[in-house]
Amino acid sequence: MSSRTGLCRDRVWRCLLWVWVTWWTCLPATAAAADYPPNIVVIVADDLGWKDVGYHGSEIRTPHIDKLAMAGVRLERHYVYPTCSPTRAGLLTGRNPSRFGIHGPIAGRSEQSLPPGTTTLANILRTRGYTTALFGKWHLGLRPEVGPRQYGFDQTYGYLHGQTDQYTHLYKNGDRSWHRNDSFVDEKGHATDLIAGEAVRFITTQRSKPFFLWVAFSVPHFPLQEEDQWVAPYLSSIKDPSRRLYAASVAHMDAAIGRITAALEKAEKLSETVIFFTSDNGGQEEYHSEVDYGGKHGPYPVLGDNRPLRGWKTDLYEGGVRVPAFVYWGGHLKPWVLQTLVSYLDWCPTLAQLAGAKISDQWKLEGRNVWSLLTGQAVKLPAPMLYWNVGDAAAVLQDDWKLIARQQNPDAVELFDLARDAAEKTNLARTKSAKVEQLREVLATQRNLDP
């Protein structure tokens, strides 16, 4: 073979290599996504109202939340339960929390918990090689024996109960709650800073394995305890002192989310990470107690803002169950607004399948994989049906029709057409009797599935 022929062949191979490398590096991020499972970060705010984020027009400044939301998929019809424990159970399992007998907050010294052995998203992701961690609020079991490590989390840090003094980290009745890996510990600092700091530490120590990080903040749930640096920006813009404290706690949380995002970026993991943000329920209207925390906190006559939605935390109206939420994955999800109904039950199957898990019928999932909705693909999903059972009242939502029924007065039902009346101003129960009866049957069927 002549040197000239060899030189030509070498040039051909170089050209082919150049074409291959150019083709690979120019692939869109979505095409390469299947080659590796993404990191998953779930951020849960506590009692954040619909209009308590900047991108919904709030007077509260949330630049870090806004930046992620505007660069991601904003979920403008994202539904949860009207209180915290049920929402967290549904997020982790993809099942209605009433199937576990969880209808409201697990409180006091209750022995109740998410049933041991329940399959959770953390369990599922561990089978896919993920390192799993939960930092912040647990609220699905108030004792270390039923803490997060019993449900698939490798690392845990935060508090077991539904609320905490931001500095002493004690529950409202004085019980210990702050823990590391389900063992009680004593730490100094504001809960928001401690939770964010633990998340940053976790991110910076992860190397080769994908990770699932659940960050559950303690704010803006009462008690509200914020330093002047967070309150001062609202002295002239918000008159009510309790609302100012609320705004300060949201701004503090937003800065903490900024720290987490910056840590992902510094570790060069942001483009490899799906971030899902939600509130656990709608904003609370007010709070006062002469017993909780020895009566040293509050009263707070003005807290959250759910406008233009009706109702508050604990309500089955939209203000209690429809919350600010978004999904961000830079380079993989385009920025847009999704108006299709999505719920807290959808995230377990969606994130599990995104990580490559095969769905099992044994998990008894009631949510859907909504990834095709997030990406804007023209894929028709099964129509969702949402069901809430809070003990003294229940509701179903199907095809934009919501029926609310109360145990004490079964005849006084409420029917709303959310497609035309998102503020739930007009009860159509009298004029739409056929629809009422149809949804009563749906409600009865769902109730029969509860223990």
Image (cartoon, grey):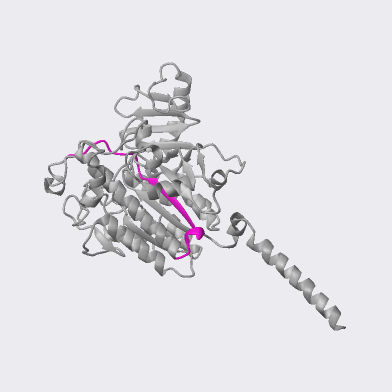
Residue in the picture at 46% in, 57% down? 40
| Viewer-side residue, 24 vs 137 | 24
Percent from the top left, x then y, of residue 245? 23, 44
Percent from the top left, x then y, of residue 134? 36, 59
Could you tell whether 409 is left or right of 333 in the image? left
**Residue 271, magenta (yes or no):** yes
Could you tell whether 315 is left or right of 240 in the image? right
Task: Judge whether 195 appears above or below 440 on screen.
Answer: below
Residue in the picture at 56% in, 62% down? 36
The C terminus lies in which quarter of the figure? top left
| Viewer-side residue, 316 vs 325 | 325
The part of the image, by quadrant, that contains residue 444 is top left
Could you tell whether 221 is left or right of 76 in the image? left
Percent from the top left, x then y, of residue 91? 41, 49
Tally of numbered tags: 0
Residue in the picture at 71% in, 68% down? 18
Task: Judge whether 412 appears above or below 83 on screen.
Answer: above
| Viewer-side residue, 25 vs 162 | 25
The part of the image, by quadrant, that contains residue 445 is top left
Residue in the picture at 41% in, 53% down? 42
Q: Residue furthest right?
A: 1
**Residue 387, magenta (yes or no):** no
The magenta stretch is 267-288
Percent from the top left, x then y, of residue 47? 31, 43
Q: Residue furthest top?
A: 431
